[in-house]
């Protein structure tokens, strides 16, 4: 499982717990749904920024010398 999926599953469990607590506190259902939508959006943004793939050339030194070529080639 990718780190993105793991992060998102954990975030969804957190949202479920917060929604359950809001329900037990008699928060109107409309506001619970609004909060869930906002938190899911924030979770996706956060997950994509934390699990961003590195550039393929990021690990290579920039000024790496090329091997000499023969003039007859």
Image (cartoon, rainbow, N blue to C red):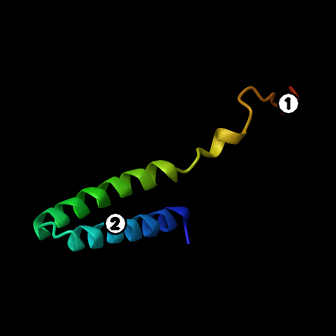
Q: Which of marks 2 and 1 is nearer the N terminus?
A: 2
Side (left or right) of 33 relative to 12: left
Measuring 31% from the left and 61% from the top, which residue is drawn there? 40
Is the residue 58 above or below the residue 29 in the image? Answer: above
**Mark 1 closeness class: few <14, some 14–19, many ≥20 residues within 10 Å:** few
Res. 28 mark: none
Measuring 63% from the left and 46% from the top, which residue is drawn there? 56
Q: Which of 57 and 23 is in front in this view?
A: 23
Which label lies toward us, 2 or 1? Answer: 2
Measuring 50% from the left and 50% from the top, which residue is drawn there? 50
Q: Nearer the viewer, residue 13 or 42?
A: 13
Side (left or right) of 50 relative to 69: left
Residue 37: % across, % down:
23, 61
Is the residue 51 above or below the residue 63 in the image? Answer: below
Q: Write down the residue under mark 2.
A: 15
CA gap between label 2 and label 1 equals 60 Å
Q: Write down the residue under mark 1.
A: 69
Q: Residue furthest front?
A: 25
Q: In which quarter of the image is the C terminus?
A: top right
Q: What is the number of callouts on the image?
A: 2
Q: Determine whether the residue tagged by mark 1 lies in a helix, strand or loop.
A: loop
Residue 2: % across, % down:
55, 67
Residue 51: % across, % down:
52, 53
């Amino acid at each position: 499982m990718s780190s993105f999926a793991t992060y998102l599953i954990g975030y969804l469990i957190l949202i479920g717990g917060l929604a359950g607590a809001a329900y037990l506190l008699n928060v109107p259902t409309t506001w619970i749904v609004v909060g869930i939508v906002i938190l899911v959006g924030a979770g996706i943004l956060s997950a994509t920024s934390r699990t961003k793939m590195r550039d393929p050339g990021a690990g290579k030194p920039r000024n790496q010398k090329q091997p000499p070529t023969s003039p007859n080639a």
